[in-house]
Amino acid sequence: MNLSMPESREGPRLLPSSDAKITTASSSTRSTQSLDYVLRSGLAGGLAGCAAKTLIAPLDRVKILFQASSPQYAKYAGSWFGFANAVRNIYSHDGFWGLFRGHSMTLVRVFPYAAIKFIAYEQYRAILIPTKDHETVARRTLSGSLAGVSSVFFTYPLEVARVRLAFETKKNYRSSAFTIFRQIYHEQPPRTSGPSPLPPSSSTTYNLARSATTAASAAGTATINTLPNTVSSPLSGLANFYRGFLPTVLGMLPYAGGSFLAHDLMGDFLRSPKMEKYCVVPNTESTSSEQPYNHSQKSKLRPWAQLLAGGFAGLVGQTASYPLEIIRRRMQVAGAVGDGRALGVLETARMVHMERGIRGFYVGLSIGFIKVVPMVATSFFVYERSKAYLGI
């Protein structure tokens, strides 16, 4: 059956007429830098992000509680059955929907986040890799890293609000998204002309920081308070929505770059001559030599192969960026504990190390692995399938 589109000026087809054969002739004529392609790839990316996040929402909430050392759930972290016990605790206190607390804010954030990420990746890739000869590891990694940073820059305030909602463990009162935004905006810790104010004794986290400062002073070494003023000075207003932004960007460089690179490399391996008869959908074609180079017009992988490539991408990205993710979570919830003083990257890292040592930077990593395989696999799978149905 011939499914090639006639050369006419008719509007683009949204759905292929058959699943038997998906050729690339129709979509190769649509430039990756055209507005039509950008809108369609953005829609595909947004849908992919929402599907992936919905699938792992309960895992995400428990992981946030572990990472941010919620007093009520810190005791479960690090044990073999910690995740199951935490889920049971949440379910008994808040019911089934307690596992999805903060998920509405997640969807509000993740649609534009995923849309921007995939749009940016396609555009950066088209610029950095105009031909197959330019398709190097460095250029692939840079394309993914820049895409991740671009998406974070535009959606980070929504991420801070989402983490705050997920961090809440109050049984009798649940904050709305509006309440959380207002609370974050108006958080105004007391300003002092001297050293940073000492936190109240009720906060375990801040007591550890105070102990670290005192010990360092006694030894005559540099203290936490000798860091630049931008580290320990209090934030307020719009700046509150960018707590943890620096470690997020630093973590996004290896996460997005590594995950997109791993996905591409695994895809290349699965399309290799030895694997293609098992992994590639029959009767699909790659871009011909006469057509402009477009990486998305490679032979289509079978569903299980697409999921495998996505899962591998998630494992690589998560492992590379997890310590910075721990620091980011701590900085994001800083206003919800202690006196709300803004913590810097180095100060937060020292605090995590004081509490649990090196292992503190990998708290919840097992949940991260359990979460990231289905999440990233689903994200890439839905994205590729959505692109096919949208004709790009």
Image (spheres, grey):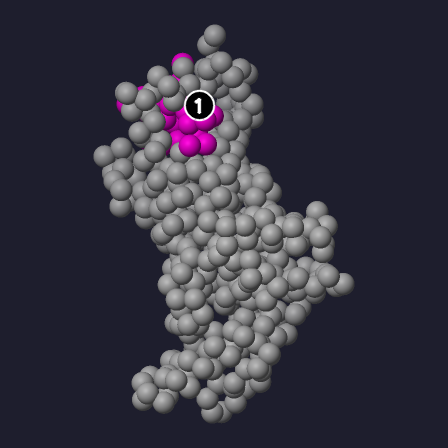
* Segment tinted magenta in the rendering: 283-308
**What secondary structure do most residues of the magenta stretch adopt?**
loop
Residue 119 in percent (x, y) is at 46, 43
Total numbered circles: 1
Which image quadrant is residue 30 in?
A: top left
Is any part of residue 47 visible from this angle? yes
The residue sitting at 53% across, 20% down in the picture is: 16
Q: Measured along the vertical axis of the image, is residue 154 above or below residue 279? A: below
The residue sitting at 31% across, 42% down in the picture is: 140
Residue 340 in percent (x, y) is at 57, 76
Residue sitting at the far right: 172
Residue 276 in percent (x, y) is at 34, 20
- The residue lying toward the viewer, choosing from 391 and 269, is 269
The residue sitting at 40% across, 14% down in the picture is: 283
- Residue type at tag 1: Arg
Is any part of residue 50 visible from this angle? no
Residue 196 in percent (x, y) is at 48, 85
- The residue lying toward the viewer, choosing from 182 and 340, is 340
Circle 1 sits on which residue?
302
The residue sitting at 66% across, 54% down in the picture is: 90
Which image quadrant is residue 15 in?
A: top right
